[in-house]
Image (tube, helix red, strand yellow):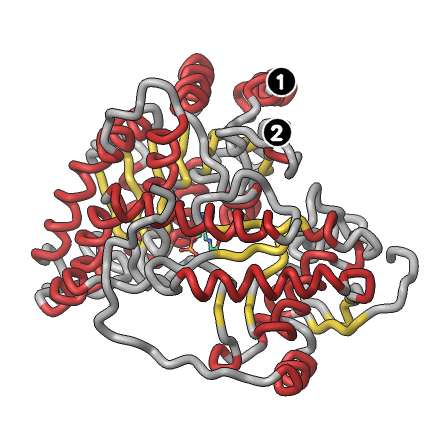
Amino acid sequence: MKYIPEPFKIKMVEPIRITTEQERREKIAAAHYNGFSLRAEDVYIDMQTDSGTGAMSDSQWAAMLRGDESYSGGRSYYELLETAQEIFGYEWIQPVHQGRAAEKVLFPVMIEKPGQYVIANTFFDTTRAHVTLAGGHPIDCVCPEGLDSEHEAPFKGNMDLPSLERVIAEKGVENVAGIVMTITNNSVGGQPVSMENMAATSAIAARHKIPLVIDAARFAENAFFIKEREAGYADKSTQEITHEFFGYADIFTMSAKKDAITNMGGLLGVREEGEHVPDVKSLVIAGEGYVTYGGLAGRDLAALAVGLREGLNEDYLRYRVGQARYLGERLDEYGIPYQKPAGGHAVFVDAGRMLPHIPWYQYPGHALSVELYIEAGVRSCDIGSYLMDRDPETGKQQQAPLEFTRLAIPRRVYTQAHLDVIAEALGEIKQRADQVKGYEITWEPKVLRHFTSKLRPAELRPVD
Ligand code: F0G
């Protein structure tokens, strides 16, 4: 059977405005060619992120009505606690308002001495920022195939084990505060990590007594890829796979805005309550709120408890990763290059290959993103050199290993027909690819520049 069954029907619709190309040209110019500065109502299909943009189910909405808003010890907290303990097998589960809040309370406690290193398969931007803010140095060690968009491999998100061992030896075990495994590996294209790679990373961490943390935003999509692609897992449930995977780590941080299909929320989990937990709890109370609500309303906790289970449902996950795969297959028809195979939550178009005449410092990934908005009102984002901040010491621009335009797919929101529009629009752009211009920044902040920078179309010139 080639078609992918969509395991839901639509009960409520939200109208979206159809704009003209002329309108879109004006809107993006007025937004200084930065998609974050557009009003969402001027966007037709919003592929900017899959974070907090999913459609909740009728069960989640029903659970929200039953949310217990007690300040401490609420029923919704205990329902979430029991659900998460069962799914992940961890003793202590702390709700927080979103993923970066978990990172913010964990890394200052984990990094005991300034200058310590934290090593990841690849850090997400906020995780990298919180390691740095806590005085640590983040280092990425992704496997080489993760950086070759044409090379098809089942687990391109894996940790590169020889590099991990080398970095630990070079820096000295006492200078490594932790290891982070991001599942799926967002920055290299939503690519999964295998159970085998997780087990091997865990063995290295255990041998050196270094804590192993899972950045678990897309844990369910990762489990489904293991079921589909790794020998010995076809007959295991995504729940069993998740339990086994989390058993290899000590701690997890999670943005619940992705696989737990809530609009807001996050979790921090600790497998065995140890010496550091009281310090983390103090930071939670100071920054997020009392430990049984963690910056969320009782109704958010209730929706999250239901969403964790729905996110692991295998009919849903087959449809979910099937959508990204379908979009990838449509792009193949038009000869559009992308990180292959398609990821779990997104398709990362290889703008560096599609627009080879635009140098990295005029941001091919961003240029394609602007062009796609003008062509069809589709919002996407750059995951390339525009996303990278300048080197804090030299002030020079930094080149990303790949220039991607990310098409992130919100959960249960868009239909196959919407995906067809995106593929056709990219096909049109390909016809006139050599006329697409690069961009230059006219104003930028010191950090996290891609959110607020102002840009304009650029003539070819050397890098600054
Ligand atoms: N970790 C990963 C792997 C993420 O992708 C994100 C967010 C976070 C942590 C932070 O979680 O947003 O709840 O604070 N990723 C979004 C994205 C924003 O568009 O990829 P948060």
The residue at which mark 1 appears reads as 166
Residue closest to the eye, 82 or 183: 183
Q: Residue furthest right?
A: 461
Residue 145: mark? 2
CA gap between label 1 and label 2 equals 18 Å
Q: Position of residue 348 (x, y in %)?
A: 58, 49
User: 454 or 417, which lies in front?
Assistant: 417
Quick one: 229 or 396, which is closer to the camera? 229
Which sits in the foreground, 411 or 103? 411
Please indicate, yes or no, whether residue 283 appears anywhere in the rendered image.
Answer: no
Amino acid type, mark 1: Arg
Does the rendering let one see residue 224?
yes
Q: Secondary structure at mark 2?
A: helix
Q: Nearer the viewer, mark 1 or mark 2?
A: 2
Q: Amino acid at mark 2?
A: Glu
Q: Estimate the x, y position of residue 95 in percent, counting from the top left.
A: 26, 51
Query: What percent of the width, then of the height, locates residue 213?
Result: 40, 33
